[in-house]
Amino acid sequence: MTQTTAASPGAAGTAEAPLLVGRQGAVTTLTLNRPASLNSFTAAMHALLLPALEAAAADASVRAVVITGSGRGFCAGQDLADPAMSGAAGDGSPGGGNADVGAVVERFYKPLAERVRTMPVPVIAAVNGVAAGAGANFALCCDFVLAARSASFIQAFSKIGLIPDCGGTWLLPRLVGRARAIGLAMTGDKLPAEEAARIGLIWQCVDDALLMESAMALANRLAALSSKALAQTRLAIDAAVPLDFAAALSREAEVQGRMGRAADFAEGVAAFLAKRPAVFKDR
């Protein structure tokens, strides 16, 4: 059974809410819901999105999160006409040259990116259309990116005199290497979903009609596994990037020691020996 609610206090209906929260079994779905603006970020959307992620993180019954967009786009990045981008200390015009963009990044995008990268459950971005600027990098923060064949990714920052944010400078070279990262960031060229999958920027490209079905199938598959092991896998892989091989091996041993004392390991072994599905509960 799927339950969908507006995440906006006092909203007259789900159509007006900038974020929709749904639940199907152990999977929470968050839908960015400003379709007329290609779901571009506003302060109002941020005010709902981060708490929704925090709520999913705190709910032990949630074992996977899917994030998608309504309408024909995933997220076009920051809405430059939003009051949050006004030059509060300058001329006050939307996106004015005196706007403190760094403060916007610190206030909204840094906590959002950090929350996604540290969720206790897997997070899947189901990219249903254009993902541009911070919208593209927000998707790339997720553990899995599934994109519709008609979707595309655009590092649009250079076109307005900025650098990639929402984790883009960290993510891009690690996902596709320095040469491609520089090329994508400096040119701001549109990258079709199929090419994004081919170069390893995203996990998978699927037919448009199969996007949500594929995302939910993956979410349910992950929800049946050990959430704690999956979260620790993400952390271990990220932590190993700056380490030498011996240090990475030592860290594996340390984490594996902790995981081996957890209930999920005992359950996994018992299920394997009994030839039955495991029922994992750690988180």
Image: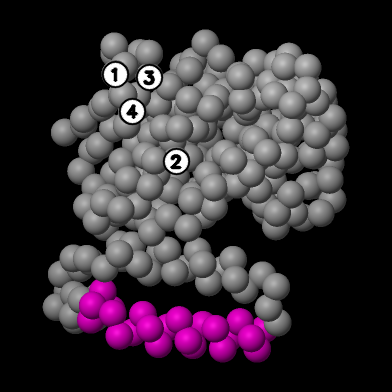
**Which element is circle 3 on?**
loop
Q: Magenta segment range?
A: 245-266
Q: Amino acid at mark 2?
A: Leu
In the rendered structure, the answer to whether residue 39 lies left or right of residue 215 reads right
Label 3, residues with CA under 10 Å away: few <14, some 14-19, many ≥20 = many
Query: Which numbered disc flags the more N-terminal residue, 3 or 1?
Result: 1
How many C-alpha atoms fall within 10 Å of the one at disc 2: few (<14), some, or many (≥20)? some
**x and y percentages locating residue 61 in the rendered image:** 22, 52
Q: Does residue 61 lie above or below 263 as drawn?
A: above
Which residue corresponds to the image point at 24% horizontal and 47% vertical from the top-left?
26
Q: Is residue 43 left or right of residue 6?
A: right
Tell me which numbered mark, 2 or 1, is placed earlier along the sequence.
1
The residue at the point 64 percent across, 44 percent down is 106
User: Horizontal placement of 279 versus 207: left or right?
Assistant: left
* Camera-side residue of 270 and 42: 42
Q: Residue at x 35, y 67 (%)?
A: 228
Q: Is residue 36 visible to the viewer in this orientation of the structure? A: yes
Q: Main secondary structure of the magenta part?
A: helix
Name which of mark 2 and mark 3 comes first in the sequence.
3
Residue 7: which numbered mark, if any?
A: 4
Q: Is residue 8 above or below residue 183?
A: above
Q: Which residue is mark 1?
A: 10
Between 274 and 55, the one nearer to me in the picture: 55
Q: Please check the rendered image and state whether residue 226 is part of the magenta-colored stretch, yes or no.
A: no
